[in-house]
Image: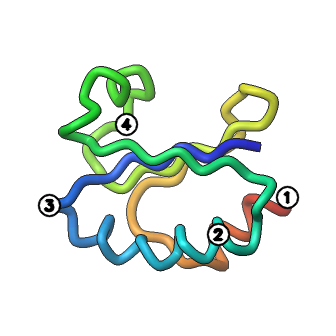
Amino acid sequence: MKIVVISSMWCPACINMYKVWTKVEEEYKDIEVVKYDYDVDEEIVKKFEPGDILPVTIIFENEIEKSRLCGEKTFEDIKKIIEE
């Protein structure tokens, strides 16, 4: 499983999610979490078509998009999707 996170430094919800992603990475060491900045990594981010609501969390399983979350979420929200 791979998780792509698209966020930005100017986004309050993205900043709030920092602790959530730290916890996800600590608890799920076998999951690759890749983080992109909406502005800095603009060319890469375009491929994911993130839309206007940040942060965007895209969960891939076997290189296929399994789920997409927009906006601030709790650790429990993320955990539920990972364990489905």
Quick one: 28 or 76, which is closer to the camera? 28
Quarter-of-image position of residue 61:
top right
Pointer 1 with pointer 3, Cβ within 8 A: no
* Residue 11 horizontal/vertical position (percent): 21, 63
Where is mark 3, residue-wise? 10
Of the two numbered discs 3 and 4 in the rendering, the one whose residue sits closer to the viewer: 3
Q: Nearer the viewer, mark 2 or mark 1?
A: 2
Indicate which disc, 4 or 1, sits on the residue closer to the N terminus.
4
Q: Do the residues labelled 4 and 1 touch (CB within 8 Å)?
A: no
Calculate the distance from the C-alpha at mark 4 to the C-alpha at mark 1. Answer: 23 Å
Indicate left or right for 1 with 51 as reference: right
Residue ID at (53%, 45%)? 34
- Give the answer, above or below, for where 38 lies relative to 26: above
Say which amino acid is labelled 4.
Answer: Pro
* Crowd around label 3: few <14 · some 14–19 · many ≥20 (10 Å): few
**Mark 3 residue type:** Trp
* Alpha carbon separation for disc pair 2 and 3: 22 Å
Q: Which amino acid does label 1 sit on?
A: Glu
Image quadrant holding the N terminus, namely top right
Q: Are marks 2 and 3 in contact (CB under 8 Å)?
A: no
Q: Badge 2 local density, few (<14 within 10 Å), some, or many (20+)? A: some
User: Marks 4 and 3: in contact by CB < 8 Å?
Assistant: no
Reading the image, the residue beneath label 4 is 50
Q: Which residue is under mark 1?
A: 84
Q: Name the residue under label 2.
A: 24
> Which mark lies nearer to you, 1 or 3?
3
